[in-house]
């Protein structure tokens, strides 16, 4: 009787880093429930019901209250993964059926040294944003666990890629509910600006108000005109304007940190 050859099916983990995401987490995890092998969640000090929601879907809920920045937090979260593949999601994202099927096919194919990008379609202030440079928002989110990880950037972290890796695109979109309202945008933007300025300051970089103004104007022109944000209606105009403001704030923050005097005792 011939020997039976069995091939182990590659396993898949969904990983999230979260804080105070009780309002989002249930809807996010419902889109991956039942077809992934592992859900890993690393919390950074939630004060809402994030943990209670998470534990409805997984026992692999961990905490790290000493916030090290986005990149280091993701690197720590990956250490808890035991599956063959990692799929990164944010709590405000939803996996569509088409994207789900594309992810499953990629994991089953198990190609060597291959990472995968997915597109995000963002819902902002009552409208899907299809211009402004926001779509297709390609982000690298799926890869073999042993192959790579995120870099250690405090903000705008990226998956580390080498020249021998192949990057392939997944079909379908992740729906991204990025901002609840204007206040949420301003709070989130301020946090990114602070992390950006801290990171640049540590590298010995400096800035100026004029540099901030120039970059802010360039940001608006790029988003609203060159990237055709005007086709996204009033939301496109507002988003372009707010992005310009956020750009000014981060350069101003760096200037204040590095080029202004502290009060004397």
Image (cartoon, helix red, strand yellow):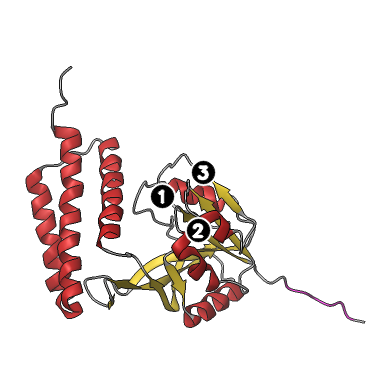
- Where disc 3 sits, the SS reads loop
Corner quadrant of residue 163: bottom left
Tag 1 and tag 3, C-beta contact below 8 Å: no
The first of marks 3 and 2 along the sequence is 2
- Where disc 2 sits, the SS reads strand
Q: Does the stretch in magenta take in 3?
A: yes
Measured as percent of width and height from the top left, residue 104 is found at 57, 76
Measured as percent of width and height from the top left, residue 228 is found at 16, 76
> Is any part of residue 258 visible from this angle?
yes
Marks 1 and 2, how far apart at CA: 11 Å
> Is any part of residue 90 visible from this angle?
no
How crowded pointer 3 is (Cα within 10 Å; few <14, some 14-19, many 20+) is rated as: some
How crowded pointer 2 is (Cα within 10 Å; few <14, some 14-19, many 20+) is rated as: many
Q: Quadrant of the C terminus?
A: top left
- Report which residue position mark 2 lands on: 16
Does residue 137 appear left or right of residue 78 in this picture?
left
Q: Residue at x 48, y 60 (%)?
A: 22
Residue 48 or 128: which is nearer the viewer? 48
Identify the magenta region: 2-7
The first of marks 1 and 2 along the sequence is 2
Measured as percent of width and height from the top left, residue 165 is found at 47, 63
- Report which residue position mark 3 lands on: 64
Q: Does the stretch in magenta take in 21?
A: no
Does residue 211 appear left or right of residue 135 in this picture?
left
Corner quadrant of residue 3: bottom right
Residue 8 or 166: which is nearer the viewer? 8
Q: Is residue 71 above or below residue 87?
A: above
Q: Residue at x 15, y 67 (%)?
A: 222
- Report which residue position mark 1 lands on: 70
How crowded pointer 1 is (Cα within 10 Å; few <14, some 14-19, many 20+) is rated as: some
């Amino acid at each position: 009787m011939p020997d039976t050859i069995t091939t182990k099916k590659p396993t898949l983990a969904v990983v999230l880093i979260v804080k105070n995401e009780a309002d989002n987490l249930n809807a996010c995890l419902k889109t991956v429930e039942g077809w992934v092998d592992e859900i890993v969640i690393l919390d950074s000090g939630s004060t809402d019901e994030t943990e209670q929601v998470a534990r409805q879907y997984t026992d692999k809920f961990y905490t790290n209250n000493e916030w090290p920045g986005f990149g280091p937090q993701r690197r720590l979260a990956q250490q808890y993964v035991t599956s063959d593949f990692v799929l990164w999601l944010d709590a405000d994202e939803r996996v569509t059926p088409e994207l789900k099927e594309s992810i499953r096919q990629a994991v089953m194919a198990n190609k060597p040294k291959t990472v995968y990008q997915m597109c995000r379609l963002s819902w902002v202030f009552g409208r899907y944003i299809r211009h402004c440079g926001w779509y297709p928002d390609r982000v690298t989110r799926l890869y073999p666990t042993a192959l790579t990880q995120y870099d250690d950037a405090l903000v705008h972290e990226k998956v580390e890629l080498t020249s021998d890796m192949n990057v392939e695109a997944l079909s379908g979109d992740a729906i991204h509910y990025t901002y609840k309202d204007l206040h949420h945008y301003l709070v989130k933007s301020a946090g990114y600006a602070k992390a950006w300025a801290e990171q640049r300051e540590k590298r010995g970089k400096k800035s100026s108000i004029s540099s901030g103004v120039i970059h802010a104007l360039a940001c608006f022109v790029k988003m609203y005109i060159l990237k055709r944000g005007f086709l996204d209606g009033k939301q496109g105009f507002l988003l372009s304007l707010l992005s310009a403001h956020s750009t000014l704030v981060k350069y101003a923050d760096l200037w204040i940190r590095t080029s202004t005097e502290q009060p004397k005792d």
